[in-house]
Amino acid sequence: MNIANVFTIIGFIACILIFLILLGAVLYFYYIDRTQKQHPILRNYPVIGRARYFFESIGPELRQYFFNNDTEGKPFSRNDYQHIVRKAKYKRDVLGYGSQRDFEEEGYYIRNSMFPKLTEELKMDRETKVTTDRYLLVKEPLFTQKKERLEKNESPVYLLEDEDAIVIGKNARNPFIVKGQIGMSAMSYGSLGERAITALSEGLGIAKGTWMNTGEGGISDYHLKGGVDIIMQIGPGLFGVRDLEGNFSWDALKEKSEIPQVKAFEIKLAQGAKTRGGHIDAEKVTEEIARIRMVEPFKSIDSPNRFREFSDFPSLFDFIERVREHSGKPVGMKVVVGSSEEADELAKQIKITGKAPDFITVDGGEGGTGASYQELADSVGLPIKSALPIMDNALRKYGVRDQVKIIASGKLFSPDRIAIALAMGADLVNIARGFMITVGCIQALQCQSNGCPVGVATTDPELQKGLVIEEKKYRTANYLISMRKGLFRVAAAAGLDSPVHFTREHVVYKDERGKTWSLEDIYQSIVETESS
């Protein structure tokens, strides 16, 4: 028998074996599908019905990459996502041909000036410069991978001048002085892995003039690695400032306040996407996270709906005063605005008691989260463009606006959105998901599962291997620097020499009929609607 016949026989036997294996698998799944009681599709259409569940499982990816157009995707459209990536990767973000915004729809617009400011007229820190790595796009062919090269790039960091610096807690022993109006919103170690937190910390440190909010999970070594200023958030779970029984620990607070990078504390009453309480799944609660939070490892954590230390505004303000006095640092509060009545009561109590937080973080209902419940994320709490006017108006109404700085958050990931928020009353803004995208987030929507495929919202060490800190930290820095540059650019177009001067008069609202309204008119209509 020659070699050709031998191979023919082997091939024939192999085909028979493959056929038998496939037949056995089909019969096995046929039996399993016919006898299971959970899925009627599989009972009626065994084996074939499995295709339905396969396509259902990959539906989000199909919509994201093939079926949604550039402006449809949620929470962020493809255009939104790409604008963030280009700022982070290339340190620039320009478009060609024209905007894809639907100008027939209603929306907010920034009033441009007939006589914009020249670049040399802008009041900004021109001395402070940093060098980052950025990509230079060499060629972008259709069928092969784009050609890029990495280069060093020195640029100003676009900070405010000293005279425009924003002082948080002017009456605290150690006020927090900020020269950049954009910071990182609360993201806990545990919700994000150590590599993501480290890359963010180091990138923000490179960009200078900003801050990093720890989230309610407490301060980790990874938050501190970049030397960036820290706002430590204290949630109802008291993670990081509690004793082993879960009671508030003034000794732990004092210990945290003595960390030089800690510039302020934030009392978290609520968060946009999870208006009451917080949650972290058991698989994310590693021994290290448990040590930082002072909880049991590998057990799910649920924060209480509210603090047990206070139950109304006077007792809240007393608690804030005590934390400020004990720590020597400014103390603020994070809220989600639900109505003008509640905002009015807050401002009224500041007036009556003579006590106030040093800042109020107003988080819009469109904000993100590592894990929440659909009914809270979708329907509880107002979005930022309604919440900001209500809070700003209430504080002005009772004459206490100058006592409190307002930090706004809620999908403020571009310079124009930030400018509108500043005009609506914010002094500063927080960004979370925009920064997550700079370190690799692809909107896989798996934050709650510990299965983030790019190693951002996970503590799984294998998945985290995909996140290279040395590369991603520069993307974070580039994004922040580009955002501040864009904010100065928008201010110049509006005839302002600095973005600190945005006021209500610099934004108008166009309705669906083309009629324009001043922001003052919009403020009044929102407040009147809420009051009625």
Image (cartoon, rainbow, N blue to C red):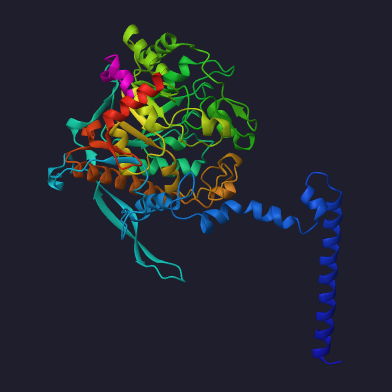
Q: Is residue 91 above or below residue 18?
A: above
User: What residue range appears in magenta?
Assistant: 392-404
Give the quadrant of residue 141: bottom left
Report x, y in % for residue 343.
39, 19
Give the quadrant of residue 446: top right
The secondary structure that dominates the magenta segment is helix
Q: Nearer the viewer, residue 386 or 154?
A: 386
Does 198 lie within the magenta span?
no
Q: Quadrant of the C terminus?
A: top left
Q: Residue at x 40, y 10 (%)?
A: 318
Q: Residue at x 80, y 85 (%)?
A: 7
Q: Is residue 258 visible?
A: no
Q: Residue at x 86, y 63 (%)?
A: 24
Residue with the most extreme bottom position: 2
Report x, y in % for residue 415.
31, 43
Does 398 lie within the magenta span?
yes
